[in-house]
């Protein structure tokens, strides 16, 4: 008996066969060779699929003054493209599935609809005046847009990118948050010191709740919603079941941005003028601490999987690291000028910070709390969003 092995590469697949001179065994070895070729082909496909999936992790930086979006590949932390928008792109929301982005253009009164895979403009949707926030419904079929200078919320059918209705709300509508079942939409009215609650089925306001002066940011810790009053010292707690105010809580001065822990046990408010972060217990609805941080804190976020907060300090060009067990700042990380948004890689090993005054993004190692890299982007990067964030 003689045998031989040969290998070749054809059409991107590896072909390996064994040939035996004995006829009785030739067909069995050919079958095994075909099976092996199929296994190799499937393996190559899986490998390529994994590579494509790795490449799909992207960060989008909305640049207010260059009217575009910088696209950053998170595997290499390099810029891979730029997408044009309308004027002053203030906010972007990503639809279910991660393919479509809705960008609110503050100075052209419209929404830019972008295919995030091909990085191509698909549509421009006219809205009210100065669209501010965009939020998708939980099923992704509807997008809601707050229009600051029209005192309305635009309802957009995300399947055909058409405005269905503009719902009148209070003055200067700002932030939006929706209940997990998609039935109630909460809107802060910065100019009329209230929160409007919209029934999304009837598409009408069913309740207006008075707050402190200048309510800005909302966060849902269901069944409750917290609203910070940037124009005063306080946070209003609303019960989404009764549509009533539960309590007004004290805070530092000018609470700007609100967020919560993953388990929703704590809520945080970044107080711009008193240079601290208010920490609230959501079970008891009470203020438990005011943690001193850097100057003019803007955003406060929990580092996923850690008992750590990152706080962007616009006035001191730094990120405060706050230990949640001690409720104390443990260090500050120098970054670029006027840091604003903080977001994270999928594994939370890296944080990304938009530096509005430096036209850059700082990349931070969340284990060592050191800056790894600085990425140049467009003019005045404001909002950052990662591709899986919906």
Image (cartoon, grey):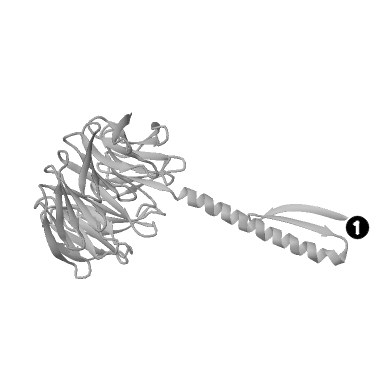
Can you identify the residue that label 1 sits on?
1
Residue 307 spot, x, y in % from top left: 36, 40
Residue 59 spot, x, y in % from top left: 38, 46
Q: Left or right: 204 with respect to 319?
A: left
- Element under disc 1: loop
Q: Nearer the viewer, residue 308 or 176?
A: 308
Quadrant for residue 360, please give it.
Answer: top left
Q: Do we see residue 120 in this rendering?
A: yes
Q: Residue furthest bottom?
A: 202
* Vertical order, 320 against 23 (above or below): above
* Vertical order, 20 against 387 (above or below): below
Residue 8 spot, x, y in % from top left: 72, 53
* Vertical order, 15 against 354 (above or below): below
Q: Nearer the viewer, residue 119 or 230?
A: 230
Q: Nearer the viewer, residue 184 or 317?
A: 184
Residue at 14% in and 45% down: 234
Label 1: how many residues lie within 10 Å, few (<14), some (14-19) or many (20+)?
A: few
Residue 183 spot, x, y in % from top left: 25, 66
The C terminus - image quarter: bottom left
Q: Nearer the viewer, residue 249 or 68?
A: 249
Residue at 74% in and 52% down: 7
The N terminus - image quarter: bottom right
Q: Do we see residue 319 in this rendering?
A: no
Q: How many marks?
A: 1
């Amino acid at each position: 008996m003689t045998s031989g092995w040969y290998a070749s590469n054809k059409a991107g697949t590896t072909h390996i066969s064994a040939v035996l001179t004995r006829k009785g065994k030739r067909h069995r070895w050919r079958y095994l060779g075909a099976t092996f070729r199929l296994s190799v082909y499937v393996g190559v496909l899986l490998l390529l699929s994994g590579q494509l999936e790795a490449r799909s992790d992207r960060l989008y930086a909305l640049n207010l003054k260059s009217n575009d979006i910088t696209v950053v590949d998170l595997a290499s932390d390099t810029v891979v493209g730029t997408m044009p928008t309308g004027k002053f792109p203030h906010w972007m929301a990503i639809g279910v599935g991660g393919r479509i982005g809705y960008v609110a253009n503050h100075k052209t009164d419209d929404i830019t609809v972008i295919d995030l895979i091909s990085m191509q403009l698909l549509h421009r949707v006219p809205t009210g005046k100065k669209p501010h926030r965009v939020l998708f419904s939980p099923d992704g079929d509807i997008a809601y847009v707050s229009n600051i200078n029209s005192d309305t919320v635009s309802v957009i059918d995300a399947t055909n990118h058409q405005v269905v209705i503009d719902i009148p709300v209070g003055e200067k509508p700002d932030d939006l948050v929706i209940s997990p079942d998609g039935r109630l939409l909460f809107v802060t009215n910065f100019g009329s010191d209230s929160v409007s609650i919209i029934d999304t089925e009837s598409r009408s306001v069913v309740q207006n709740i008075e707050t402190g002066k200048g309510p800005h940011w909302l966060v849902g810790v269901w069944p409750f919603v917290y609203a910070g009053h940037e124009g005063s010292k306080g946070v209003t707690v609303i019960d989404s079941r009764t549509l009533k105010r539960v309590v007004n809580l004290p805070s530092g001065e000018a609470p700007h941005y609100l967020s919560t822990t993953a388990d929703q046990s704590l809520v945080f408010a970044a107080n711009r003028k008193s240079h601290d972060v208010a920490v609230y217990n959501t079970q008891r609805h009470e203020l438990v601490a005011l943690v001193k941080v850097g100057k003019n804190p803007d955003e406060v976020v929990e580092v996923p999987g850690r008992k750590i907060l990152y706080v962007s300090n616009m006035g001191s060009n730094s990120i405060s690291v706050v230990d949640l067990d001690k409720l104390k700042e443990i260090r500050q990380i120098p970054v670029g000028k006027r840091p604003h948004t903080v977001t994270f890689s999928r594994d939370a090993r890296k944080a990304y910070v938009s530096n509005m005054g430096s036209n850059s993004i700082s990349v931070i190692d969340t284990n060592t709390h050191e800056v790894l890299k600085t990425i140049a982007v467009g003019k005045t990067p404001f909002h950052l969003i990662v591709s899986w964030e919906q």
